[in-house]
Image (spheres, coloured by chain):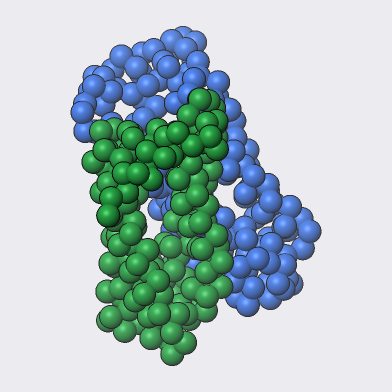
Chain colours: A blue, B green
Amino acid sequence: MSALEICQWINGTNLATSIRESDWVYPIIETVHVLGIALLAGTVAIVDLRLLGIVLKRERVSRIARQVLPLTWAGFVAMFASGGLLFLAQASKSYVNPAFRIKMLLLVLVAVNPLIFHSTIYRSVGAWDDRTAAPGRARLTAVLSLILWSGIIIAGRAIAYF
Amino acid sequence: MSLLPLFQWASQAPIFAVMRDSKWAFAVVEMLHLIALASFGGTLLVIDLGVLGIGLRSQPVSNVARDLSRVFLGSLVLAVVSGAFLVSANPMKYYYHPAFRVKMLLLFLAVTFNFTLHRKLVESPIGAALTVSTKLSAVVSLALWFSVGVAGRSIGFL
């Protein structure tokens, strides 16, 4: 089975059809997905801006990161669940949509970014926790994260235009 | 006083011609509107949930609120300006749109509440952060802004 055939099969399931054809379920899922941006990308942005020394300069990086993380995870769960359902309902269309493909690629990159960050420069956070701006490599990760998340929002919105 | 003349003027105004005529101008401004939503909503959640003891709770909320106020204000301004340009693409459609009207009313309430009562309570230096009135204020603030978001998303569905 090719990926396209899998998407076509998903598209034809009862669950996908009932979401797609409902008057209220689809708009509600989309509303959750849009408002979830604030919880996911918004809280990530605050940690990124702290690393760059733009906000919350007097607070330790590790404390901000640790305390904001549960909100970010909550946002991730809301976004992943609602996004998954939106995809189910439009699987065949999404598969061939260039904006959707770019969004998926950016999502992979945005997941790799914190993995690298946490397994490298963040290990030594004790040494730079108090500094206004984090070391260069940490600032680079923060800039990449802001660019990738903006790209994801832009690509996500663009799905509707293709 | 009616705002109708303002919307009628915007429907004709040469500066909004590009918004009326180009599909991509609308799309690009819409993307900016969403990015503004992300950073506005992120700061709002971190401040108001912090008051309620969720997220940033070991820092004095007044410090967090003052430190984030530039991002809060900047993204609110970006959201309002980009929103105005979105409206300018078809002002008369929005003027009569029920979800748009509800959104503007809620936005007015949310902004007024924020800059009169809420901000004073949250930014007051004496860790007033955790009094009942501050917590209540945070709940009202979250509820108002959430309603603005829901009403905004509904514009596309109604």
Q: Quadrant of the C terminus of chain B?
A: top left
Q: Residue at x 72, y 73 (%)?
A: A131
One can see residue B95 in this view: yes
A82 sits left or right of A120 in the view: left
Q: Quadrant of residue A138?
A: bottom right
In the rendered image, residue A63, in percent from the top left (x then y), is placed at 56, 71
Q: Nearer the viewer, residue B76 or A148?
A: B76
- Residue that lies at the very extreme toward the bottom in this rendered image: B126
Q: Residue at x 45, y 45 (%)?
A: B84
Q: Quadrant of residue B137?
A: bottom left
One can see residue A28 in this view: no
- Residue that lies at the very extreme toward the right in this rendered image: A136
Q: Nearer the viewer, residue B84 or B114?
A: B84
So how many labels did they put on this image?
Answer: 0
Q: Quadrant of residue B109?
A: bottom left
In the rendered image, residue A159, in percent from the top left (x then y), is placed at 48, 26
In the rendered image, residue A9, in percent from the top left (x then y), is placed at 36, 13
Q: Residue at x 47, y 12 (%)?
A: A4
Q: Quadrant of the N terminus of chain B?
A: bottom left
Residue B15 drawn above or below residue B144: above
Q: Residue at x 34, y 76 (%)?
A: B117
In the rendered image, residue B11, in percent from the top left (x then y), is placed at 42, 34
